[in-house]
Image: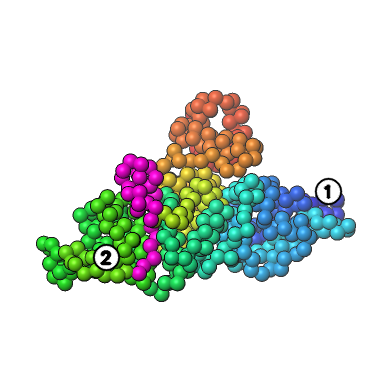
Amino acid sequence: MLNESKEWAIVEKHLGRILDMVTDPVIIINNEGVVVYVNQGYERQVGVSKEKVLGRCLYDYYPHDKLLQVLEEGQAIEAEEHYNETLGHKIVAGFLPMKDEKGEVMAVAGIGTSASIYHIYTRLSPALTIKEKRKFTEVTKEKLPSSFQEIIGEDPRFLNCLNLAAQVAGSDASIILRGETGVGKELIARAIHETSANFRHPFITVNCAAIPENLIESELFGYAPGAFTGAQPSGKVGKIELADKGTLFLDEIGDLTLNTQVKLLRFLQERYIERIGGNKQIPIDARIITATNRNLEQMVQQGEFRMDLYFRINVIPVYIPPLRERPADILILAYHFLDHYGKKYHKKLGLSTEALEYLQHYNYPGNVRELKNIIEHAAIVCSGEAISPDFLRLPFHDHLQEPVDLNLTHAIEYTEKTLLKKALEKAQNNKSKAIEYLGISRGAFYAKIEKYGLHDKEKEGG
């Protein structure tokens, strides 16, 4: 494994048997960062065969891994709790350098405890390329206020977004959160509120797109007794009034009608409201946070959104990147949701290597909300302990991304494996037809089937 001496071969033979008796996972890399050994405990605990792990180079995927840190520095790390940026949570593991007679590190062993088994093998999944890692800023979760630390995500783009939101949370300036549906705008709005000076007061949310046009004004401003037919005799307090001294979060503000926009602008300027059917001016002191997934600039040009209101709410824009632009967060979030739903449905669940690849390369048009639904669905319908691609409900299959890994060999292998699967699926597992679709020789077909481990999953046909 580590050298070719006869003595070492004997030791290695017995060492492997000893390590296989260890129930905790053990992983070893050589001095080039390539995985050269995993024990049976690793296979049992993480649910992935050693054939799929051996030969992977951590430098290609996770150059900041603890194993590589020990390889480069030569200093052991005791079995204690460490924050792993790749996994996005804390693990308990020890890392031991193995040195030759000259004191040079020849290999590093990572030994996990039961507390670190939680998806330890995701360090081997291609979530970030080296190029992405080099973009990493000095922003870390530990430097953010506690309310922002609770938001799941470690991608550099996302951390920069959280950092900006945290910086402006203490001011009273109007903040607008820009981003696609499902990226977590309300989570960030709530974190801003909890970091602000008015955190002890109400956080009131209004989804402007979910309220019918004829009800939005009464929902926002409330109404006086007897204001209209069917109104409550005692009147109603509006959402803006409920947010007094606290924070008002207006989600999907781009869906407000022009008439409501006028009244909202008046409130933002004057800081008081009048209930519908009433004439009393009610002063309101509330922090305003808005959000939208629409192009407000284009709406202003088309006369669909008031320019004066746009400038009033767009003082500090915070852009939240979609999940497809946060590749490091896909598996972090997937395992977070898997842990949550595993506990909810009383199941012990993991993700197969193939399922990880599917999740990594899906485009997530519904963003984090869609990923959450995908994992919950899989957790419910999965009958075993390992979730395979068969249990992943990816409704928009045309939203599959190309691999984020820029390594040409890996990209070719990914493409070959994908095409093999598609050909077999189209041929209904008839291998002769699949060979015809692919336009390759029978020998090449079976060689690739063997290479990608598809031989035991597909039925022989034709």
Q: Is residue 169 above or below residue 305?
A: below
332 with respect to 235 (left or right): right
Residue at the (55%, 52%) spot, across then down: 157
Helix or strand or loop: what does disc 1 sit on? loop
Looking at the image, residue 116 lies above or below residue 434: below
Under mark 1, the amino acid is: Glu
**Measured along the vertical axis of the image, is residue 192 above or below residue 295?**
below
Query: Which residue was labeled with disc 1?
Result: 4
For residue 13, side relative to residue 320 (left or right): right
Q: Is residue 152 visible?
A: no
268 or 252, nearer to the observer: 268
The residue that appears at 51% across and 37% down in the rendered structure is 421
**Where's residue 43, x and y in %?**
61, 55
Q: Is residue 297 magenta?
A: yes
Q: Earlier in the sequence, mark 1 or mark 2?
A: 1
- Residue bearing mark 2: 273
Region in magenta: 285-312
Q: Residue at x 64, y 40 (%)?
A: 407
Q: Nearer the viewer, residue 148 or 317?
A: 317
Looking at the rendered structure, the kind of residue marked 2 is Ile
Residue placed most toward the observer, 30 or 127: 127
